[in-house]
Amino acid sequence: MDQRLDLMKILPGRVLDAGGGASLGLLRRRYPASALIAIDDALAIVSRERGEGGWLARLQGLLGAGKRPALAVAARLERLPLADQSIDLVWSNLALQRAGDPLPWMREWQRVLAADGLFIFSSLGPDTLKELRRAFAAAHPGRAHVHDFIDMHDLGDMLVEAGFAAPVMEMETLTLTYDNVMTMAADLRAMGAANALVARRRGLSGRGLWERAGAAYEAMRRDGRLPASFEIVYGHAWKPKPRQAAGKPQAVKFYPNWERPK
């Protein structure tokens, strides 16, 4: 996502990191003069970001020296406590897949963007954790245990429906490897993706199910490691000026596996 910003002609006055705030350092380096805001509905994440930089950085920011302190706020991502057209850049790195329906989030982020503002995001596509999905399907046929992630073509259509212009979608697949299933599960929990393992079930998965799924996963072991695929979907689009909003919706450009034309 940071590399994609190299291609964007934008000098934002206000930047919103929607979902986590983990990119605040990166965004500050790129836009040192911008006001940075991080919003997430997880209070623990926001509390961590409120302490980012320490007292010296906050004092320097108040005195006009050094980097400007970021504002970290706990709020629902589909109901932002921000005024209309108050943000110039909305950045969302691996948060959109948490939405049961991403369209209300996109509409809200479009609302807070100023005209000609940029929305750039990454999310997880349907091939994410495909190995784990197959293992649970073998262990417990007929019941889903892994979250179904949204295809990039559908996300692109949602951008248009939310009122964005000139949307561009890209995709790549990354494969991580693990010693065992439980190590991977711990990693997913640390990423905040534990719900992907239980697919909205209210109760805990039993030990027997995990053992059967683990045995099915073992058949996929390669070179002593268990693979875990992550389909990463990238997208960006612009907030059109009011006179452009009533025009004909623009077609979405899709570039699988970064195969963009030269």
Image (spheres, helix red, strand yellow):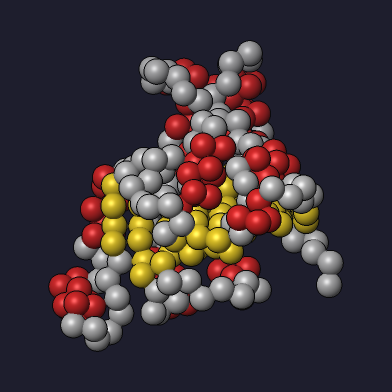
Q: How many marks?
A: 0
Q: From the top left corner, tell me how far across and down residue 241 is, in percent.
A: 61, 59
Q: From the top left corner, tell me how far across and down residue 213 is, in percent.
A: 56, 26
Q: In screen coordinates, is 151 left or right of 21?
A: right
- Say if residue 184 shows up in the picture: no
Q: Nearer the viewer, residue 222 or 202?
A: 202
Query: Farthest right residue?
Result: 261
Task: Determine whether 19 is above or below 86 in the image.
Answer: above
Query: Farthest front residue?
Result: 243
- Say if residue 64 shows up in the picture: yes
Q: In screen coordinates, is 154 left or right of 94?
A: right
Q: Nearer the viewer, residue 214 or 53?
A: 53
Residue at the image position 39 percent from the left and 79 percent from the top: 33
Query: Farthest bottom residue?
Result: 65
Residue at the image position 39 percent from the left and 40 percent from the top: 79
Residue at the image position 64 percent from the left and 21 percent from the top: 138
Q: Nearer the viewer, residue 84 or 23?
A: 84
Split into 4 quadrants, where in the image is the N terminus?
bottom right
Q: From the top left corner, tell me how far across and down residue 76 is, in percent.
A: 36, 40
Residue at the image position 26 percent from the left and 66 percent from the top: 52
Q: From the top left corner, tell me how far across and down residue 163 is, in percent.
A: 62, 46
Q: Nearer the viewer, residue 133 or 168?
A: 168
Split into 4 quadrants, where in the image is the C terminus?
bottom right
Task: Determine whether 212 is above or below 53 in the image.
Answer: above
